[in-house]
Image (cartoon, rainbow, N blue to C red):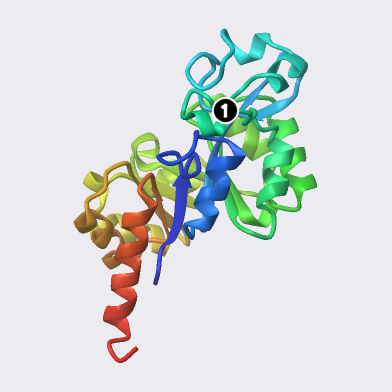
Amino acid sequence: MTPKLVCHRGASLVAPENTFAAAEAALEGGADLIELDVRESADGVLYVLHDRMLDRTTDGAGPIDLMTSAEIDALDAGRWFAPEFEGQRVPRLDAYLDALRGRAGAYVEIKWCDPDRAAAIIRDSGMMDRCFTFSFEAEMRAGMRRAAPEMRHMVTLTIARNVSVARSVHGASIVELVPGELRPGVVAAARAAGMEVMAFYEGRSPAVFRSFVEAGLDYINHDHLEVARAVLAEAGRAESPEA
């Protein structure tokens, strides 16, 4: 099994995170899915943005939930990263999913928003079967399960504690683990429960990426696309030595 590559906030090492530019760079680099974060404006528009505060990744300031969509749409979300990205905007969720449709899947992390709005946007995008959701906030996880019971939902092993709880209590079809949690018993339990397994790894060690491939994981959520692609290519050559 070859794991699908999930680009964390897009190709955020070569373009400003959670922007159209980061998504395009990830797609050009061979990503299978884009991880993105969702927050809501004061007037109920959903945006792709990690932080509640706008200060770090835009030329704005203050909480996104206290600003209107007109104010957010006017912000620059690229110049902080590099001059050539000036003019990048904070993407609206619907437009971002439209840009991914037919090209990649999406891992939608709900930071804080109306779950019904998020579910409706994902449905309207035609991406329901190519998305899965997660939130570190218990209220958001429960809200998304209620608003989109037909959708795939993920939970971390850290939150669930074990695969059985991930499935029965959190209603998850995907469990995410970090390298220190990668054990044969965990993967076997997930398989027995009919769940997929995703690793989250922010480092760039080829050996760690190889361990994910060897464990037969379904997804790798990561920041270093070039390292991940090289390891997958190496694994492919090992499986087909005559190619």
Q: What residue do we see at 47% from left, 62% from top?
A: 194
| Residue 241, image x, y percentages | 27, 87
- Left or right of 221? Residue 210 is left
Say which residue label 1 marks: 49
Q: Where's the N terminus, which quadrant?
A: bottom left
* Extreme-front residue of the structure: 84
Q: Where's the C terminus, which quadrant?
A: bottom left
Q: Look at the numbered disc 1 and give the secondary structure of its residue.
A: loop
Residue 19 shows in this picture: yes
Give the amino acid at mark 1.
Leu
Residue 119 shows in this picture: no
Give above or below for 158 relative to 86: below
| Residue 179, image x, y percentages | 25, 47
Q: What residue do we see at 43% from left, 41% from top?
A: 14
| Residue 224, image x, y percentages | 35, 48
* Extreme-right residue of the structure: 124
Give above or below for 19 relative to 195: above
